[in-house]
Amino acid sequence: MMTLSEGLIQQRIDEVRVRYYPQVESTNDLAKEWLLTGATTGAIVVADEQVKGRGRMGRSWYAPPGTALMFSMVMRPPVDHASRITMLGAVAVAQMLEHLGIHKVGLKWPNDIQIDGKKVCGILAEAVWHDKDMVGVILGIGLNVRVNFNGTPFEQTATSIETITGRHIDRVDLLADLVARLHEGMDELGSEKLFTEWTSRLQVLHKTVTVADVHGVVEEIEPDGALIIRTSDGAKKEVRGGELNYEVEDVGKRGTEGAG
Ligand code: BTN
């Protein structure tokens, strides 16, 4: 297994500023600090292990050293395109996995990347504010490369790239591919193309879902990623973020969130 190092990463990704650490609390926090002290847009913080890695909805996110690709990118989108950063991250990861020849890649709203229904990657995008001004957005990505979920509570809900491909996958190759896709997509955040790439992998339109206390059928997806849900009493509700449970109507069970 190739160990990560700043030199190795910087050699492959020479157009982007890189900071690498064997162990950190959270790459998102370090990227946030770097954003505030003048990081160039697109700069990345990479770690082999996070001891306080954060997930969505206040969850923690952990992977043993050597098993995952964890990084955060400094971005400065226009404020009205900030919500599209998570879309960009999810589409970039999905396209990268498809490029590796992996089938059945899907997105679980709002931004989990799944392979055959099992979570392989989580995204945590955090906007950084100074008073009323948005200074930037940190895009944090945690990708299971060779995390072994066998015998863990996540066996049925999470997977890793190497489990799927059955071959060694270099984390620096993945990082270089993703960074290139993210940089390319940064100029097209508001585009219909990005929205279509995202929604086409979501499979949530016209499905019955529950998000927090809202239960109903997804009628529309807003350009910023919010769902418009028609509830059984005929009301239309708009939801963003939150925890999504799909109702698998034919077997009467609800899917649950994957783990990372
Ligand atoms: C989720 O699935 O809830 C999101 C997980 C996001 C994890 C990544 S790992 C790199 C970055 N740093 C963090 O502390 N979290 C994100």
Image: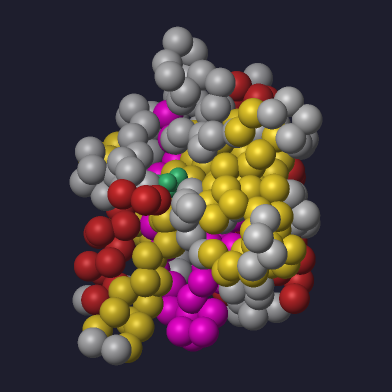
As drawn, the residue found furthest toward the front would be 233
| Colouring method of the image | secondary structure
What residue is rendered at 51% in x and 71% in y?
A: 83
146 or 219, which lies in front? 219
Q: For this view, does 19 lie left or right of residue 162? A: left
In the picture, measured across the screen, residue 184 lies left or right of residue 4, that is right
Name the residue furthest bottom: 132
Residue 148 lies in the magenta stretch = no
If the image is split into quadrants, where does the C terminus sit?
top left
Q: Position of residue 210 (x, y in %)?
A: 57, 48
Relative depth, front residue between 156 and 234: 234
- The vertical placement of 227 against 56, above or below, is below
For this orientation, the residue located farthest to the top is 151
Q: Position of residue 117 (x, y in %)?
A: 66, 33
Magenta stretch encompasses residue 83: yes
Q: Within the image, what quadrant is residue 218 found in? A: bottom right
**Is residue 183 visible to the viewer in this orientation of the structure?**
no
Q: Report the label total.
A: 0
Give the vertical position of 149 relative to 220 (above or below).
above
Residue 251 falls in which quadrant of the image? top right
Boundaries of the magenta span: 67-90
Q: 101 left or right of 172?
A: right
The image shows residue 246, relative to residue 82, as above or below, that is above
Question: Which residue is drawn at the image coordinates 43% and 19% (left, top)?
Answer: 153
Q: Is residue 126 visible?
A: yes
The N terminus: image quadrant: top left
Could you say where residue 62 lies in the image, as x and y percent from the top left?
Answer: 33, 35
Which residue occupies 56% across, 21% down? 156
State the image coordinates of residue 42 (x, y, percent, origin top left): 45, 69
Residue at coordinates 48% horizontally, 80% vertically from top-left?
77
